[in-house]
Image (cartoon, rainbow, N blue to C red):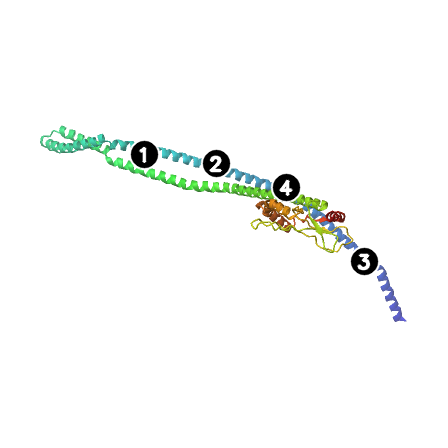
Amino acid sequence: MGVSGGGILVLIAVLLWAAVLVPRLIRGHQHRARLRQSRKLQRTMQRLAHVAQETAADRLIYSAREALNREKLQELKLQREAAQREAQLAHARAERELAKLAAKQAAKLARAQMRAAKLVSPAMQRLRRVLAVITVLAVVAVTVSGGYAIATGQTTLFFAALTTMFSAAAGLLLCAPGRNQHARELLQQQRVAVQRKAQQRRQKQPVSAAVSQQTQEQPKQAAVVDHAAQVAAQRRANAERQARRKLLAQVRQSTAAQQQAVATGEGLTLENQTQSILLRRAAVKQPDSVPQSAPQPVAVEQQVPRTVPQPTPQLALQPVRQPVAVPRPESNSQRGAEWTAASPQRAEKAVLTPEQLERQQLVTRLRRMGDLQDLQVTAVDLDAALRNRRSANS
């Protein structure tokens, strides 16, 4: 009994602990979790606010840095421009100095040239000779007057001869031909330098001019060639189109004339077909009275293909392009006379002209290309055929 009572007490304690303490512990755990979450949210909000403040400050700092960098770049740009201007000014000054030096050298060379020209003159040559003679005589006089001054003690002649000698020597130095040679050398050097510069400019200018001219003429030539090709192609197309139109018109006219001739039966000699009610065109027979030298007539026989009459009222018939009227003469004499009279015309019709040959070739080529179809297709009128047959029999 004691053991069971202790177990019951333990069970009751466990149930109480489970019913009271466990929910309390759970609620405490949830409360602590909420506190932790609220603290985290507060920290995140604080961080976000701090970050927002920092970003605003950073933006200000960044904008200030950008402004400073822009100012620095502007200053550098201004400094570079100032340096370029100074360099240009220095270059201009140097060019001016060089021009001044060149002008001075040119003036010196001109003066030297003038002096050299003066020194080369015959009068200067004679003056140099006279000064040379005077110098030699002055040297002799100085020697003699020096001896005389030593012997007698009078120095007047000695100083006079010495002054004359120095004056003549100075005149010789001033009129010396060596200056003329130096001036000639300077002038020769200047001429050589000028010729070299001119040659270099001539070598550079034709190449640049030729290159620029070629670069300018190439597109012009290409445009002219393209335009000429387009014009030629357009002219060819127009000529072919006009030739096709003319040919089609001629073929249609001949076809209409042949259809009308077949329908009316004019200018045709018809004969009965064997085992058929249809008619066919008669062949032209050569008379016996025609001489051997006469040209052979063109055969104009073209029969309609023999077919069994069908219930359809139309039959295919391909007429001749140029129907020839062959009348029946009454006698052999009349036939021979008519043949003799008509033989030149028949010979002219038998011989085709170059234009007709070219037209026939063009028609054949157009038919092969599919641009021109066979237009010479007509239908046979049975009533007209029967009337022609009755009139021929009568």
- Residue 53 is at least partly visible in this image: no
Give how far across and how far down residue 317 sits, in percent. Answer: 70, 50
Residue type beneath disc 3: Ile
Residue beneath label 3, please?
26
Q: Which of 38 and 140 is in front in this view?
A: 140
**Residue under the point 40% across and 40% down:** 202
Q: Which of marks 4 and 3 is nearer the N terminus?
A: 3
Query: Nearer the N terminus, badge 1 or badge 3?
Result: 3
Q: As drawn, is 371 to the left or to the right of 200?
A: right
Which residue is disc 1 drawn over? 109
Of labels 1 and 4, earlier in sequence is 4
Element carrying mark 2: helix
- Front position among marks 3 and 2: 2
Of circles 1 and 3, which is in front?
Answer: 1
Task: Please state which of the two labelled residues, at mark 1 or mark 4, is closer to the viewer.
Answer: 1
Q: Which label was assigned to residue 85?
A: 2
Chain-order first, disc 3 or disc 2: 3
In-image side of 2 versus 194 (left or right) = right
Q: Please identify the quadrant where the N terminus is shown.
A: bottom right
